[in-house]
Image: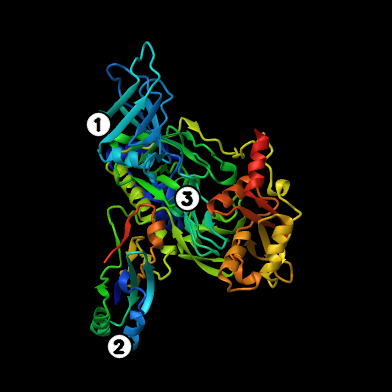
Amino acid sequence: MKIKIIIESAIVTKPILAEAILETGVLLNISQAHYDTTHGEVVADIPSEQFGHIRDSLVEKGAEVVVLDTPISRDEEECVECGACVSVCPVGVFSLADDWSLEVDPDKCIQCGTCLTMCPHNALVLGQ
Amino acid sequence: MVKKTIHEINGRIRDGSVNVVTAEEMVDIVGELGAEGAAKEVDVVTTGTFGAMCSSGVWLNFGHSEPPIRINKLWLNDVEAYSGVAAVDAYIGATQASRSKGLEYGGAHVIEDLIRGRSIDVHGTSPGTDCYPRKVIDTTINIYDLNQAIMLNPRNAYQKYNAATNSTNHTLNTYMGTLLPNHGNVTYSGAGVLSPMHNDPNYETIGTGTRIFLGGAQGYIVGEGTQHSPAAGFGTLMLKGDLKEMSSEYIRAASFEGYGTSLYVGMGIPIPVLNEDIAKATAITDDDIVTNLLDYGIPSSNRPAIRSVTYGELRSGSIDVNGKEVTTSSLSSFKKSRQIANELKDWIKGGEFFVSMPVERLPRDTACNSMKLSRVNPLVGDIMTSDVSIIRAEASFNDAAKTIMDRQFSHLPVVDKDNSLVGIVTAWDISKAVAKAEYDLVKDIMTKDVVTTSPDEAIDIAAFKLDSNSVSALPVIDAKKQVVGIITSDDISKLLARRQ
């Protein structure tokens, strides 16, 4: 499953991710990390059954943990199902079905955002 | 030999006995029955395409204001429209960008907003004349307030289009979408088997006056489109239709990152099957349509073709580019293209749409020429400094500092033992290194990701590179990456000063 870990600026210098990984032994796989002056955001994949474990550890260290149910969503009104997004996605979220409809597999999404830039119809948004 | 007339086919449309199929369905029919059998069986073949067509726009007439104005400059939702035709006519073009919203909102969006019945802010100015005294107009209108809203697209329905990829080491944002570095993806456009002009390659039924599907309404072919280049297989059409009857289902604004706005236009042409030659032509498949894969990494209108490729290969999802399997993306929607061909089929079957013969044939042997340039365009090689100092990556940065002092040149290309360019070091890099006192060698402080140019590149491209990368000098290298000169923003300023 995919989670977003939000780290306030006051504690961004502390290695809380490393500590939580060592403490819990959970194989946390980071796919995105963005830091600015106010906070840091890390998107990561974790084994679903260990969610409670790593969440508790991170929360205890001051981070906020949000489950990303739909990392990417598509506005079906705006989308014309051209398939422009298909070739820029590094993890194969998008594909065209036999009837040339666009299929989206949000579970694979690592929230890199490349498809948002590519989409000529502004039909894609990163979300939760 | 099968021979039918438009009159006979329209008679069948009228009495409901007409047999209409899409160009996709026709492939199997001709396969089964042969061209002669298919020509007997099928009366009309419908085509369709839905993709970005930048060369599109709408003529608007607002009616006269009180007191009257002859609008000289006009903006619709802050997007400029051309109004240098009489008093209250204007042409809103799809790619014109908004003054305030930039590349996100443009003429294409104004057109879609009009179709959706949304309000549009109008701002017009005029010098004022005795007959048109008013100097400024500000009002809000929607499509119902306009006398006419006539879509007139100078160049639509490209017979086929080149596919795009990018050989450079950085991402390009183009009208062919995001092109990832090192041939990371391939994009293409066109409906292949459903492509209107490919189903009548001799333009026997497609010509001036042909009735078509345009944006969900009946429209017409005006004639050849601009840049019509049939000799090379790149025919185009100029189309017109009534925007007031169109639907946002088939006309959609789009915005390409770093390029700007464009209009997705849905159009389809019915091909009356008058004889077996026409039947045979409409059996064309994706595998029969060949286009070129161009490298958009080359900033020239004469981009080299990496390979030729069929629409069958492009639509399979991936193609081979220099030995690597690369994923393809379509920019046009095949699903919508199919929807258009089917809707047109239903119109004809339902007796709502009649086929027509052109009143004038399209040119079939013309070519599209490049722009005539009356002034010689200087090349990088013409103004670069050839006497450029270089430094080895293994040299100390003290040596680099000395060279910069001696030569009074603030950029030093860095080379390896084979004299190939590996980096660039500036006076600023050296100051930084001195201040930090961490490193000794040029290779530790140089910028490794160097933006370069070549002697035969146009100055305009070098200037664009300097600007878009926020750098002030470009090493000039030859095909073997050997440094043959350097060009700076100063060199270009001096050139411009001389021109004036």
Q: Amino acid at mark 2?
A: Thr
The reply to whether residue B56 is visible in this rendering is yes
* Residue B25, picture quadrant: bottom left
The residue carrying mark 3 is: B175
Label 2 crowd (10 A; few <14 / some 14-19 / many >=20): some
Name the element at disc 3: loop
**Marks 1 & 2, CB-CB < 8 Å contact:** no
Subunit that carries the residue with mark 1? B
Distance between the Cα atoms at labels 3 and 1?
32 Å
Horizontal side of B226 relative to B429 (left or right) equals left
Q: Amino acid at mark 3?
A: Tyr
Residue occupying image coordinates x 63% and y 54%: B473
Q: Who is closer to the viewer here, B454 or B189?
A: B454
Task: Judge if badges 1 and 2 mark residues of a common chain.
Answer: no
Q: Is residue A48 above or below residue A126?
A: below
Distance between the Cα atoms at labels 2 and 3?
48 Å
The residue carrying mark 1 is: B144
The residue carrying mark 2 is: A24
